[in-house]
Amino acid sequence: MSDIILKAANLTRDFKVGGSLFAKPKILRAVDDVSLSVQRGETLAIVGESGCGKSTLARMLMRLIAPTSGEMEFEGRQIDRAEGRTLRELRRDMQFIFQDPFSSLNPRMSVGRLVGEPLETHAPELPAKARRSKVAELLAQVGLRAEHADRYPHEFSGGQRQRIGIARALASGPKLIIGDEPVSALDVSVQAQVINLLADLRDRLGLTLVVIAHDLAVIRHMSDRVAVMYLGAVIEEGPTDEIFTNPRHPYTMALLSAIPVAEHGHTRQRIPLTGEMPSPIDPPSGCRFHTRCPFARTDCKTAAPPLRDTGTAPGHRAACHFFEEIAAEAPPPSAPQDSNRTDAARARFALYAEAIAGTGTRPRETT
Amino acid sequence: MVLTLVQSAPSPSAAPLLDVRALSLGFGTSKTRLLDGVRYSVEAGETLCIVGESGCGKSVSSLAIMGLLPQGAAHIHEADIRFRGERYDLNDMAALRRHRGADIAMIFQEPMTSLNPAFKVGDQIAEAVTAHNDVSEAQARDRAVEMLRRVRIPAPEARMNEYPHQLSGGMRQRVMIAMALANDPALLIADEPTTALDVTIQSQILDLIRDLQAETGMGTIMITHDLGVVAEIADNVAVMYAGTIVEAGPADAIFNDPQHPYTIGLMSSMPRLTGPRERLTTVPGTVPTVETMPAGCRFSTRCPFAQPVCAETPPQREFGRGHRALCHFAPLDDRLERSA
């Protein structure tokens, strides 16, 4: 019934920091006991601020680094200790898109070779001619032209480079794609193009996506489910609409309330967070968020809260001792405000959307 | 009942603090102007947001005003600028140096690269004070401590002796702000000051800038790509595209009654936090480069409404209260109709 493609249980990753001949290194726990499961065909977003461990988690899921402890399964196969051929075969089914389209493409390789390279690895039996036509097909899929294959990365803009990165990820015919901040380096207008492209590809190819990002608005548009991380742990997870309308963890509430809304005169109930994220070398006792939580009680300093069902929607869980009480005293998230746009402006936006969708416009005959 | 008009500081003839009447420049031998007829003004106590995407010239325009463009690289075609009502000459390097860091200060996106990693932050702030004032080192250090306190850094005396790498991103940006404001500038230019920061820290820094502006009455130019930040703090907005200001006006007019197709496209492209989660309406294509810059309207290569007439220079259309847009067809709802 439930078809889980990727499953992670109790993943933990430690890094050694400092240390010398005489001093023992300190242990930085970047990811602490994270369990996740990804359903086939869904998009799971992992969100959090810098230093929350989301990129380390992504690298573990990609198997670019091995977990210190914990288990991972891909389509029922154990992968957390996979090596050699098993790992190579895994890479065919599981591909990545990176954040920076400027540093993730080899500047000395033509686009054709960049996109064809995964084919050489994963389908070495393919003759060169077939490979070239496959490359052309992949480029078309991401909205580039076949003749772009002869050009080099520096000839392309950031958005086009990200498309090349996506074509490269699609080359081996993966089932799962993990994107670490796939659109955050792009300008808004180009970012929207790439978000739409990823949604189209997911629907057309039946892909499963795991997207790591810090931009909550982007995540809301791309994902079906969200996991919010703070200081190495998932502190809330649930269906996207539920997380955005009904956040239960105070950190999620604060994060949502901190985002400036692009609407003039929008008043929002801010939940101000003081200070900054503590160092993961020396995390706070008890609830890891208690040092910044405006609702913290004394118990929060001693007992670490487990993720538990909120009972508000299936699969919605939060790691907070007191979310029931807090929900009652916290201001509700800003209700979807009716935009203050003038009627004429609304007409212009509609005209623009229709023109983009293909409806022609012409100058009005002035009498 | 007696109504009294409270006039704040006696401003000479109520001239804007900074009045850029025309600024056009290019790089190297290229004929294409990187900035073409840029025009904006800022009053004391007011925040102007210049919003646009990478390469639109929003940073270049403020670097030019600060005199920070590489010498000889930029070719200034025209520059008619007034600061406090007086002529502001971009070729007078000595005058620019007197203004820079004194009455016009700037903060940058990446505080790590704008702070010198080899010096303690306290010394760097004190240096900004001694550069423009005849004070002793001790006085400069006192001023530095006071500035750190004003940007709400806890234990400022201790922080004075720390190096930039010992501070977090948010703290570094606070140090940059302390340094910029050390000489009580009349104008602060902030170039993407919160882009490198997390949202919870971003809102702290925006609050700080707003508070300090209220305390000091300085004018602020905020350069950003984030319309959310613009909505949060702008009094006036200038939307830049490919080196031109395509639309400008009071913030409420820009958000509630946008006129230029690029402004509308930019707002449509933004993923939203509320409302239906539908497919995003985009701005197709990419920004033209210096080589591919079209004649006439620079947005015409990406505009869904473009017509043959757009190859001609678009007229500046006015909509009252200083709201203006550079478009042949503004207002679109009056001048265009569906052809189907």
Image (tube, rainbow, N blue to C red):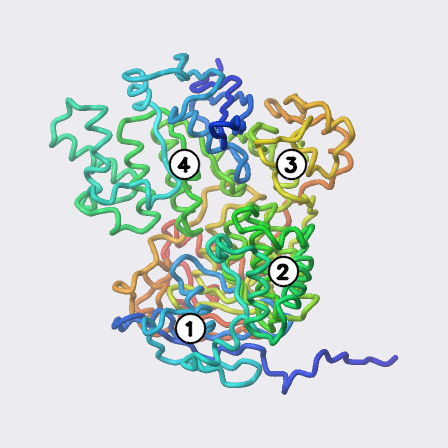
In-image side of B165 versus A360 (left or right): right
Q: Are marks 4 and 1 on the same chain?
A: yes
How far is disc 3 from disc 2 in space, using C-alphas?
A: 24 Å
Q: In the image, which disc is placed on residue A251?
A: 3
For disc 1, the chain is A
Q: Position of residue A206 (x, y in %)?
A: 37, 27
In this orientation, does residue A154 appear?
A: yes
Residue furthest to the front: A22
Q: Which residue is mark 2?
A: B209
For disc 2, the chain is B
Rendering quarter of residue A80? top left
How far is disc 2 from disc 4 in space, using C-alphas?
A: 38 Å
Q: Are marks 2 and 4 on the same chain?
A: no
Quadrant that contains the C terminus of chain B? bottom left
Q: Nearer the viewer, residue A305 or A255?
A: A305
Secondary structure under tag 1 reads: loop
Amino acid type indicated by mark 3:
Tyr
How far is disc 1 from disc 2 in space, using C-alphas?
A: 48 Å
Q: Are marks 3 and 4 in contact (CB under 8 Å)?
A: no
> What residue is at 38 percent from the left and 29 percent from the top?
A177
How far is disc 3 from disc 1 in space, using C-alphas?
A: 56 Å
Q: Position of residue B248 (x, y in %)?
A: 51, 69
Q: Nearer the viewer, residue A140 or B225?
A: B225
Q: Are marks 1 and 2 on the same chain?
A: no
In this orientation, does residue A349 appear?
A: no
Amino acid type indicated by mark 1:
Thr
